Every structure is written in C-alpha cells, then in structure tokens.
Amino acid sequence: MLSKASIYGIRALLYIELFGNEKYISIGDMSKKLDISFHFLTKILQSLKEKKLITSSQGPKGGVSLAKSAEKIFLIDIIRILEGDKIFSQCVLGLKGCGTKTPCPIHDDWTKIMEKIKKLYYSTTIKKLSEKIKKSKLRISDLKI
C-alpha cells in the first residue's frame, strides 16, 4: 500500500532514532544495515531534509540526524513528503474516476478501511514505534535491536 520510498523513509527515521543517540548516523552504514540501496536512501533522505525532518552534516563524523523530536514526527509527515496525499484518494483497483459518484465494487469498504489507516498514520510517531521496537524486541530489517 505504501511506496518503497515511504517504507524506507519510515525505517530510516526509526534507525536514526534507535541508534543516533543525538549524533549523526552514516548514510552508508544505515544503507547496509537496512539493506536499502545507498542511492535510493540518499534520495529519500534528501526529501526528508528539505522538509526539515532530518538534518545532515558532512565530514568524517557526518551523516544524518533527526531535526526535531521523534515525538513530533508522525508517519503521515513522512508519507506526505515522499508520496503526497494521492495514497488516500487512489482507487484500490486502479480505476480512474473512482469516487462516491462513480465507485468501483470495493470503494465503500475500502473507504472505511482507509479512514482507519489514516487515523493510524496521523496518531503514530517515530518515538512510539521506536519504544515498541525496544520493548518487544521487534525489527526494522534483519538487524537485531
């Protein structure tokens, strides 16, 4: 349902929150640990930097870090930056013009599901997910937390 960019963006911010410890994280190291193409990750991080979710520093100890508190970064922020709002208006069957006036066979049910997903994206922060990862020993890649 989410694009790879959004999925990787969320995983990258979780990685920064979990391992950053208020210092910069190497994009190369993050790319390897999360098994994401360095060039694709760099492009994603550039978009997040432009919208001030992360900051970057060059040099031997450079990399990226969160630009604001993880409690203030919601999933919807990341998704909007990386793919816009189209995710909430696209037809699940890919039909053009699908809507309340000309619905597809799944439209009404999908709209109800999408409203629940939107609430999740608007209420879930990077901090909330990182705490859940630590508490339950969950993963964001094959990386052990």
Image (cartoon, grey):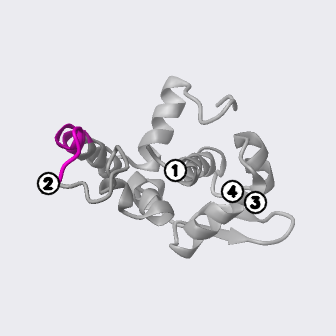
- Mark 2 is surrounded, within 10 Å at the Cα level, by few (under 14), some (14 to 19) or many (20 or more) other residues, namely few
Q: Earlier in the sequence, mark 2 or mark 3?
A: 3
The x and y percentages for residue 45 are: 63, 63
Residue behind mark 4: 41
Q: Earlier in the sequence, mark 4 or mark 1?
A: 1
**Residues tagged 2 and 4 counted as in contact (Cβ below 8 A):** no
Residue placed farthest to the right in the image? 60
Q: Earlier in the sequence, mark 1 or mark 3?
A: 1
From where the camera sits, is residue 26 visible? no
- Mark 4 is surrounded, within 10 Å at the Cα level, by few (under 14), some (14 to 19) or many (20 or more) other residues, namely many
Residue behind mark 1: 3
Q: From mark 4 to mark 1, how far is it between C-alphas?
A: 13 Å
Q: Is residue 133 left or right of residue 86?
A: right
Magenta stretch contains residue 58: no
* Mark 4 residue type: Leu
Residue behind mark 2: 100
Q: Nearer the viewer, mark 1 or mark 3?
A: 1
